[in-house]
């Protein structure tokens, strides 16, 4: 991985408590359930099943998220290239963050994580910082932000479905 391929300087910024200034920030969080869904949710994120569950076309260079894996996401007429910056998978957090590459509609980074609280509650969250990079996103203005939030919600819904279907298939 060559960090100069990324279209932004703050690589790994979604791991920080405070997101980089000068970008639009997005924080979305939704509850998935209790302890029993944690590993199913983690697996759905790390194998791109959650993204596919949104209806997005996903073309990764590997079957599982890992730093340096590149993927192209397609939604409608848009195709956006990204590269995975980091992966987390421990008893409390699992998921990954990816950064934008040339040709993406935005510049920035987005993280998709499942988190387990001490009380056993399991949550999905997405955090991002971005600015428009190409004309279509610039022209959309505030609607681009609405679309980003809508995609975060779609991811949460897809992850809930993935957790339910995983439970019934293996039972």
Image (cartoon, rainbow, N blue to C red):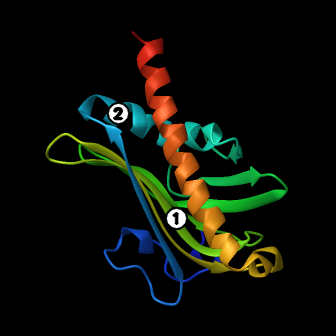
> x, y (%) of residue 109?
54, 69
Q: Specify the quadrant that holds the N terminus.
A: bottom right
> x, y (%) of residue 130?
58, 76
Query: Can residue 6 be seen at all in this image of the molecule?
Result: no
Local crowd at mark 1 within 10 Å, few (<14), some, or many (≥20)?
many
- Residue at the extreme right of the image, as rendered: 77
- Residue at the extreme left of the image, as rendered: 119
Residue found 61% across the figure and 64% down from its top: 148
The quadrant in which residue 86 appears is: bottom left
> x, y (%) of residue 152?
54, 55
Q: With 25 as the anchor, is 123 left or right in this view?
A: left
Query: In front: 76, or 170?
Result: 76
Q: With 66 as the anchor, is 18 left or right in this view?
A: left
Q: Which residue is mark 2?
A: 39
The quadrant in which residue 51 appears is: top right
Q: Which residue is mark 1?
A: 110
Local crowd at mark 2 within 10 Å, few (<14), some, or many (≥20)?
some
Judge whether 84 appears above or below 115 on screen: below
Query: In front: 34, or 69?
Result: 34
Query: Can residue 159 be seen at all in this image of the molecule?
Result: yes
> x, y (%) of residue 120?
19, 39
């Amino acid at each position: 991985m060559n960090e100069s391929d990324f279209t932004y300087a703050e690589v790994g910024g979604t791991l920080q408590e405070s997101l980089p200034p000068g970008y639009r920030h997005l924080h979305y969080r939704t509850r998935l359930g209790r302890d029993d869904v944690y590993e199913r949710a983690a697996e759905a994120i790390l194998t791109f099943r959650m993204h596919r569950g949104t209806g997005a076309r996903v073309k990764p260079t590997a079957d599982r998220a890992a730093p340096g894996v590149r993927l192209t996401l397609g939604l409608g007429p848009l195709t956006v290239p990204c590269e995975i910056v980091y992966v987390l998978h421990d008893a409390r957090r699992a998921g990954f963050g990816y950064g934008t590459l040339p040709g993406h509609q935005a510049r920035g980074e987005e993280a998709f994580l499942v988190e387990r609280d001490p009380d056993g509650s399991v949550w999905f969250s997405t955090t991002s910082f971005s600015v428009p990079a190409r004309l279509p996103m610039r022209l959309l203005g505030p609607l681009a932000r609405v679309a980003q939030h809508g995609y975060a919600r779609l991811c949460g819904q897809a992850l809930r479905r993935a957790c339910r279907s995983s439970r019934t298939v293996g039972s």
